[in-house]
Image (cartoon, coloured by chain):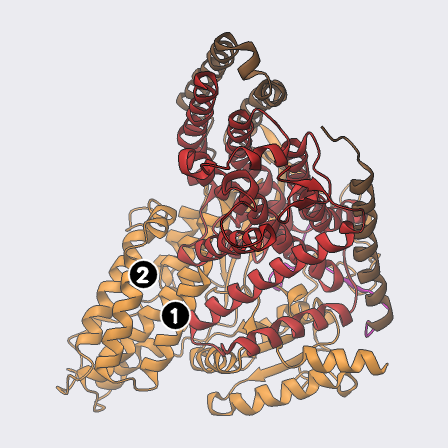
Chain colours: A orange, B red, C brown
Amino acid sequence: MGVTMRLVGLAARRPRVLMAAMPGATECRLALEAGLRRRGWAAVPSPAAADVVAACGQVPPDLAGPLAQVWSEVPEPKAYIVCADPPSVEADLDRVAGRLADPAGGPGPGWAASQPEYACSQDDGMGMGVHGGSGHGVDGDGGMEMPAGLAMADRGADRDGLKLDQLHAGLGPFLADWPAGLVLHLVMQGDIVQEATVETLGATPVGSFWNEPWRQAAAGGEVTAGMAARRLAACRLDGLGRLLAVAGWPDAAGAARWLRDELLAGLPTTDAARRFGRLERRVGRSRALQWATAGVGVIGGPDVAARYQGWLADIAEAVAALDDQTPLPGSALVRSLPVPAPGELLAALERAAVGAEIGAVRLMVAGVDVDLDEAVDPAGVGGG
Amino acid sequence: MVVETAPLWAVLVAPALLTALAGVGTWADRLVEARAAGAASRPEAVLTGMVSDAARLLVAQRRATLAPDRLMWRLGVVVVPVAAVLAVVVVPFGRWAVDDLGVGVVWFNAMEILTWAALWAAGWGPNSFWSLIGGYRMVVQGLAYELPHMFALIGVATAAGSLQVGTIVAHQRHLWFAVWMPLGFVAYLLSVLGFSFTKPFDQPAGADLSGGVLVEAAGADRLVIAAGRWLLLAAGAAMAVPLFLGGGLGPGLPAWAWSTLKSLAVLGVLVAARHRMPTIRLQRWVPVAWLVLIPLTIVQVLVAALVVLAR
Amino acid sequence: MSSNFLPVLALLAVVLGAVGSLYGLRRLVEVSRDPLATAPFGSGLLPSEHALSRFHVRWYTLCMLFLAFDMEMVFMYPWTRVVAAVGPSSVIEMFVFLAVLLAGVSYAHREGALAWA
């Protein structure tokens, strides 16, 4: 056991973190991302690669089940944290490293709350025996073969009128670089989407973190245009980071997120302009990124390539206005909110995903500012 | 003789050298990425990260997804490093190759093609939606890079009139093939990125698939396939040296030193390419590969054949 | 010309031994002997059917095109060794054949075989 424990200790020096972003907790996610960067810990996209599951924000009841599912997919040694309070993220990360180095200590703070309810809450017709391995079996429809208690793919018509195997898959809720609380249920044939349905989980429209200065100004608070510009620039850098990560450019994504965090921490204008200039040259002039994203996007809207160029232009403008001390007018500027209400975007995504390759769908979602913290139009999609 | 078959104990040295090259590549790669993102990036911190990752994957609990195809899965994972190491049988280190086979170029090609099948199997095995799509993406990727790769190899073999790597090196005594066959060289480097499913050709293991073929790989399996990926890249970089850059030939330094320096330089170029751009989507790349790269590499072979006729 | 495959077999034994001992080492140091039986990653959701299925390969025409070229490659490797000996006729025949194949590629492209989504 001595060698094992030494190796476990070595592993705990650089944990690999699966981040589970919760709605209404953008600040927690930002604090966690910044914490990981300071320590040189990496965020990973799947449970098999992770040893830490970090819930960013309070876990809403309808996300507890999916979170428990993701947790159950991580191999030992593993640890779990809920980062619900941005200032205490550093302490949380210290604690989780301690847990990892000592596997006998249990999963981690805050875990017990969501675990037991899970077994009953997830049973919506997909009652597969995950923990038993061989499965309990489900009532099949009409004597269909069910190896390991799970149905085989059934056939459905494709666009050419052929009958071919269909797979049902969900994108989200806990996908890396994905809007918190969003689920896109897909019917797939091969790598092409046949049907897409949006569901939102855990969304409580508390108002987007990115729109905060405008909300405060509208409520009569004292907000300068410079403060709003800082938030807008950070918002666009956040979107850019997500898009670049999905597009498979971790260097540029990391640079965008780093600048975002520094801006929010009060980076002076000259430094911000210099560092943004470097990022803009790198990303804005990348032909490969243009090539990967041109023509991908929601129907009737700008494509993803045009979206990120627009973001870069927004950031350039905002960075130039960081020191603007004039007060932000109260209500006139609602039009220019960084993040819109997501209702229409979600409906447009549903339509645009059909017939697209799955990688293109990921780019599409990353290319629109979906933030479920803004109120979803009650007449629109969601909750279904 | 420029290249000779080494004594049998070289079979112990060659994998060690390849692993060292792959290790240097991984380290440089992580260093560059950490610097770009403002993460902890002292060189020794990056090394600690690598050791920590290896330790984690060794001690981690075994993991089996629901009803996997175990045989395919394990086979796919193991073949990746095995093919990479077997490919360097014909790659000379200075004057010595493990075995300077008469069909060396074809052997290298065959080993590299093994990984094509292996990645599909590794994607199929776990019975997972994401990795299944990743596995099939590797098949498309192979359809796009294999032919330019083969034409690049054939151009070299035509110019030397031989499939033996030693003879190919000897033919570059006066002029490297990279100098007068630049298209073949570029196509070869692109295909190295392709068969080692490395950025920008990493769609089979893409971020948009949460890791694709790697999504369910945990513990020792993940260690083996991730190491195999870097071994493949290193093997491709090492093979570029005898094929296009004159092998161990060079003034002043001993042959093994030239081999080392040139391999590191090629690996450096490949690692730099990883960080210069995002993933190239196959739907965009396939038409380019078939309509631009294949005709260009064919023209390259034609040029080589005409040069041979004129000699 | 060497065709002694003994070193190749020896290297195969070495690398299989290395991979095998890595798995063996894992067996010695792993934290738990019980494998984790888990659902495949579904970003928090459980799968509703097995992923292993008849994958809809929309780029199958690309495979056909590839096969045509791949058969041609089988001849081209030995061809490289005889270009000088046989002379211009070998080059003319090979490249006329390649031109025919390339014509096939351009036809397939016009028919949309290189795009699939």
Instruction: Write down the chain letter for disc 2.
Output: A
Magenta segment's dominant SS is loop
Stretch of the chain drawn in magenta: C30-49
Is C37 colored magenta in this rendering? yes
- The answer to which image quadrant residue A20 occupies is bottom right
Is residue C117 among the parts visible in the rendering?
A: no
Q: Is residue A42 above or below residue A361?
A: below
If you read the primary sequence from the N terminus, does the residue marked by circle 2 or circle 1 appear first? 1
- Residue type at mark 2: give it: Arg
> Which residue extends farthest left?
A326
Q: Residues within 10 Å of mark 2 (few under 14, many from 20)?
A: some
Q: Nearer the viewer, residue A218 or C67?
A: C67
Q: Nearer the viewer, residue A59 or B153?
A: B153
Q: Secondary structure at mark 2?
A: helix
Label 2 sits on residue: A282
Instruction: Write down the chain letter for disc 1.
Output: A
Tell me the quarter of the image containing the N terminus of chain A: bottom right
Q: Nearer the viewer, residue C52 or C70?
A: C70
Q: Secondary structure at mark 1?
A: helix
Percent coordinates x, y for residue B256 in the rendering = 61, 53
Percent coordinates x, y for residue A73 in the rendering = 70, 66
Percent coordinates x, y for residue B8 in the rendering = 81, 47
- Residue type at mark 1: give it: Ala
Q: Is residue A160 above or below residue B204?
A: above
Marks 2 and 1 in Cβ contact (< 8 Å): yes
User: As drawn, is B151 to the left or to the right of B108?
Assistant: left
Percent coordinates x, y for residue B138 in the rendering = 59, 42
Is residue A210 among the parts visible in the rendering?
A: yes
Is A43 colored magenta in this rendering? no
The label number, if any, that marks residue A255 in the structure image: 1
